Image (spheres, helix red, strand yellow):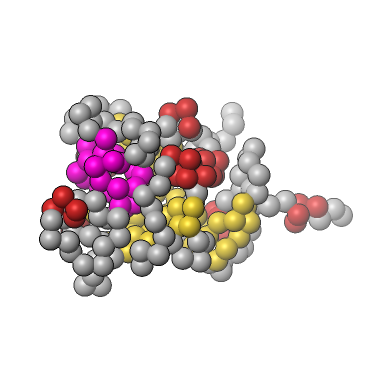
Amino acid sequence: MHHHHHHMLPRDCQELFQVGERQSGLFEIQPQGSPPFLVNCKMTSDGGWTVIQRRHDGSVDFNRPWEAYKAGFGDPHGEFWLGLEKVHSITGDRNSRLAVQLRDWDGNAELLQFSVHLGGEDTAYSLQLTAPVAGQLGATTVPPSGLSVPFSTWDQDHDLRRDKNCAKSLSGGWWFGTCSHSNLNGQYFRSIPQQRQKLKKGIFWKTWRGRYYPLQATTMLIQPMAAEAAS
């Protein structure tokens, strides 16, 4: 009997969960066609999730250029951004569930879950969203087929505003529709700045606590949905 399959790395946290892993923590994975890399897996009752973003103390600077957002940055034990290329290699062509955990300074928490599809770098890592989700992320008119929101940084402006570079006038890199609906990679504020100009650069999710409320903590997790069986 050959046990060589034990040496193969899992494709993602969900695969780890499927072979019986129930402990959250750091694991090495190897998505198809990708070199291996470390990820934070969060094991829950509904499977294994890969943490793609975490913020809680302002220790890591998120105001970075395209290459940094593509490759990833930060500390896997603290605040980090996993990297668009890694997230894309995990999701591949599969649809995914994106979970967004938000926390304010009064201990209130919110958990949002969306069905998404992430394109590759040739699409500027566009997040394809269904209509209701696209509205939350700042789309004003959404075709029934949904909406594609490219990722933007100050040095690569792909946002849906013609007249403005959202990443430059706000902070960090994000799937900016208009500039005003959400930005979980904004500047970390421990207290509310007096000037609105400064405040809008913060971490916010408009439909939850409003555009000018800087959140205390955010975590983003992704879980690919089962690939369609090849017919």
Q: Position of residue 160 (x, y in %)?
A: 26, 31
Residue at 19 percent of width and 53 percent of height: 198
User: Magenta residues, as a range?
Assistant: 165-186
**Residue at 28% across / 65% down in the picture?**
216
Residue 231 is situated, as x and y percent measured from the top left of the image, at 59, 28
Front one among 167 and 104: 167
The residue shown at (87%, 54%) is 1
In front: 66, or 146? Answer: 66
* Location of residue 193 (image quadrant): bottom left
Residue 196 included in the magenta stretch of the image = no
Eyeballing the image, is 194 above or below 91? below
119 relative position to 15: left or right: left
Question: Is residue 168 on the magenta stretch?
Answer: yes
Q: Is residue 51 visible?
A: no
In the rendered image, residue 177, in percent from the top left (x then y), is placed at 26, 36
Above or below, comparing residue 45 to residue 7 in the picture: below
Does residue 136 lie above or below 204 as drawn? above
Give the overall secondary structure of the magenta segment: loop
Is residue 55 in view?
Answer: yes
Quadrant of the rendered image containing residue 112: bottom left
Residue at image point 34% right, 43% down: 174
Q: Is residue 24 left or right of residue 220?
A: right
Residue at the outermost bottom position: 107
Single out the residue that lies furthest toward the right: 1
Number of numbered discs visible in the structure rendering: 0
